[in-house]
Image (cartoon, rainbow, N blue to C red):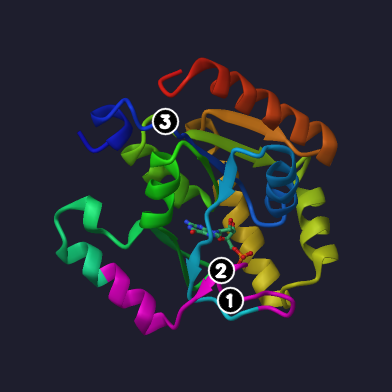
Amino acid sequence: MDDPTAMNPTIPGRIYIITGPSGVGKGSLCQLLLEAEPRLRLSVSATSRIMRAGETDGVSYHFKTRPEFEAMIAHDQAQPDPILHELLEWAEYNGNYYGTPRQAVEETLSNGGDMLLEIETQGALQVKRKFEAACLLFIAPPSFEELERRLRVRGTEAEPDIENRLRLSRHEMTLQDQFDYVLVNENLKTCLQAIQAIIHQKQGAGVGG
Ligand code: 5GP
């Protein structure tokens, strides 16, 4: 009874989740998907992480202080009705909080839009427990060495941060069997096409399929 789509089969939209280790190309794939798939809306996450150069509050993330984020967590823990929660899921990753604002997701789904979430693995599995029909796509690197190379080339994190993300990635790679699809991002275009094929198949099958 936790799954609103199960309780209400008329909710027309579906959640697609792109998950997988940091640096695997989730962000690039999501950008391309949004351009190619007009029904998809991107969920803008909340985070307590510090804003990077080039990021915009409200667009890249809703940037929060740690106390602000912890207040949302406390609110949800005190609220038994999930319909009144601030966050659909949240996780602590690499020392920072990340979470998906619930209301935007549910409004989009109710209006017939499909939601695209780009989140780490723990959060993805939390969403699946609430929305059984959510489609979870785990993006894997061709090799661990290639993942490390991509994280370093990206140049957005300092060395200790990179080391920690790589350590977390090793763990995330062990979870891949728990997702609906595992796609290797060797070539961005090929991986994008594989994701689109899955989305088109789901859109053709309707909400339950
Ligand atoms: P970054 O700091 O590189 O922007 O994100 C770090 C990790 O947090 C990435 O794996 C990213 O996908 C994930 N992430 C971003 N937003 C969310 C969210 O709302 N919830 C969860 N659980 N993870 C998120």
Q: Residue at x 63, y 51 (%)?
A: 21
Residue 41 visible in this rendered orientation of the protein: yes
Among numbered discs 3 and 2, the one appearing first in the sequence: 3
Foreground of the two, 119 or 31:
31
- From the image, tell me which residue sits under label 3: 12
In-image side of 182 versus 5 (left or right): right
Q: Establish whether ligand 1 lies closer than 8 Å to the Cβ of label 2.
A: yes
**Spatial CA span between label 3 and label 2:** 26 Å
Q: Secondary structure at mark 1?
A: loop
On whether residue 67 falls in the magenta region, the answer is yes
**Spatial CA span between label 2 and label 1:** 6 Å
On whether residue 36 falls in the magenta region, the answer is no
Residue 89 visible in this rendered orientation of the protein: no
- Residue 119, image x, y percentages: 54, 53
Q: Amino acid at mark 3?
A: Pro
Q: Can you say whether 88 is above or below 59 in the image?
A: above
Labels 2 and 1 touching (C-beta < 8 A)? yes
- Residue 95, image x, y percentages: 49, 73
Residue 148 is drawn in which quadrant? bottom right
**Spatial CA span between label 3 and label 1:** 30 Å
- From the image, tell me which residue sits under label 2: 61
